[in-house]
Image (spheres, rainbow, N blue to C red):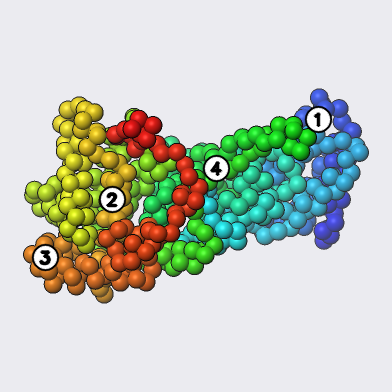
Amino acid sequence: MTSEIDIKGAVRAWLQQVGTIAPESRQSFIWDRFPPQPSWRAVRQAVTSAAPATARPDLYVTRDPDRIHDRVLLDLTGLAAFAQRTTPDDLRAQDIVAREFERFCLAPAPVSEDWVLLEASFPPDTRIPIGDYVLQTFTEPELRQLQALPSVDDLPFHSSFPADVLAGAAFLRRPDAERELLKGARFSPAMRSRPELLHWQPLLILMLWSSELTRMQASYEVEPGRRVGLDHGTPGIETHVAAADDDVMVEYEVHEKGFYEVLPEDRERFAAFCAWADDRIRKVQTQGGKRQSRRLSRSAQHLVRAMHRTYTGEYVPEEEIEEVLLHYVIAIEALMADENNLDLSRKVQIRAATLWRTDRTRQAVADTLKKAYAARSKYVHGDEIGEKDKDKVDLAVLRHVAFQTLLRWLIIATSKDNVVNVPEVLDGATLSDAIRQNDVLKPIDAFYASTPPAWRPTDTPDAETEEKAPSPAERRPRPRLSSGWGPSATES
């Protein structure tokens, strides 16, 4: 049997030969497979002997499992890209790449994973399970180890996954054991216009924790130790300029993480909240019946879609305003509606308002929803929503109402052994103070006493105490932008 060093030695010999070829002739030399160069044939033989198809089927042609897949070994790993620029004197780099290539071939085949890059800040060494996902931060060496050849820096995908810039960034990871490892191009049968919905559950939980904005910046197909492939979006990377010691201006890239932040002292509480929220969502999905489960998922998906069209926490582009308004109203209606749909807008306003403790807050919630329904009605009937109508609806306030409605719906729905019909409970609470105290306020108060999020509304117990502490946004002030409807700070 071929020893492990044979792969490294064969690759090193091939790289040394490639380094002697004129740059303009290397492309044809590297990819000349008919017949292959003797030095590359030796690489094939070493890989075949040390990593047979039974152990690493991803290295072999699917239709001919006895034949090495040259494009995987050369293109996917980045070996060809390195070979294009190596020189005869580049012996140390060639030795490093040869060892990395050998390690790649001898390692077990990885399981494909979905990775979601978040616009958020988390402490180093964060690793928090959220349902099927793990929220995790990584160092630069850890991110480099995701590719087959960690030392090769100039691969095409590096612009979408720069390990040095994304070090410390937060990702949601989820294994996908059913997805085959990539060998050639992969074509999606349909264009994904709303990719955030593929990951709505952990994104929703993150959004329920804080009033600050978080979003999916980009998603990747990751085969740890093999490759990283951009699936959708782009990382939020900006170029900054700073003066060096000699007063020379230096450009450097920074990953923009926004204002959503979980501090080290809050990490344990954040993990507890995520576990609670995931458990309650799953309870509705498994015990609440199809209708309850659909209501929750549809409401959540509309909220996630709205948040991915909102920027800096409040600003909504003009062309997105009406759609975002519809998302919020539909999200609330999905949770507050009943089966007969009679006098629906009034019922939704009253039921949603009943979720709040104080008269002042309940009236404010009802007024907000009344204005939102009026604007939606104009949109549905083809009427123009004028500036006066827009000024009446503060999308930032409506967002607050929508997310708190979902959170409180989830608390009440899962407050007993069986999943509760929340609209029925709220209807009873409007007529009975005992029902309101025992079935609405008591579960909400118990939740905020045990696993509260950082986002603590003013009508909850100890809210006044919580509000004295500065938020991450207050520690890092930002310019106030308009929510899209109404004057901005610069206009006031």
The residue beneath circle 2 is 402
Give the mark toward the camera: 2 or 1. 2
Badge 3 marks a residue whose secondary structure is: helix
At 20% from the left and 33% from the top, the residue drawn is 389
Q: Nearer the viewer, residue 372 or 170?
A: 372
The residue beneath circle 1 is 26
Give the mark toward the camera: 3 or 1. 3
| Residue 1 shown left or right of residue 124 in the figure | right
Specify the quadrant of the image occupied by residue 69: top right
What crowding class fits label 4: few (fewer than 14 Cα within 10 Å), some (14-19), or many (20 or more)? some
Where residue 178 appears, x then y in whole percent?
51, 55
At 84% from the left and 60% from the top, the residue drawn is 3
For the C terminus, give its image quadrant.
top left
The type of residue carrying mark 2 is: Ala
Mark 2 → mark 3, Cα distance in angstroms: 22 Å
Badge 4 marks a residue whose secondary structure is: loop
Where residue 160 appears, x then y in whole percent?
60, 39
Badge 1 marks a residue whose secondary structure is: helix
Q: Is residue 350 above or below residue 390?
A: below
Q: Nearer the viewer, residue 37 or 75?
A: 75
Marks 2 and 1, the one that precedes in the sequence: 1
The type of residue carrying mark 3 is: Gly
Badge 2 marks a residue whose secondary structure is: helix
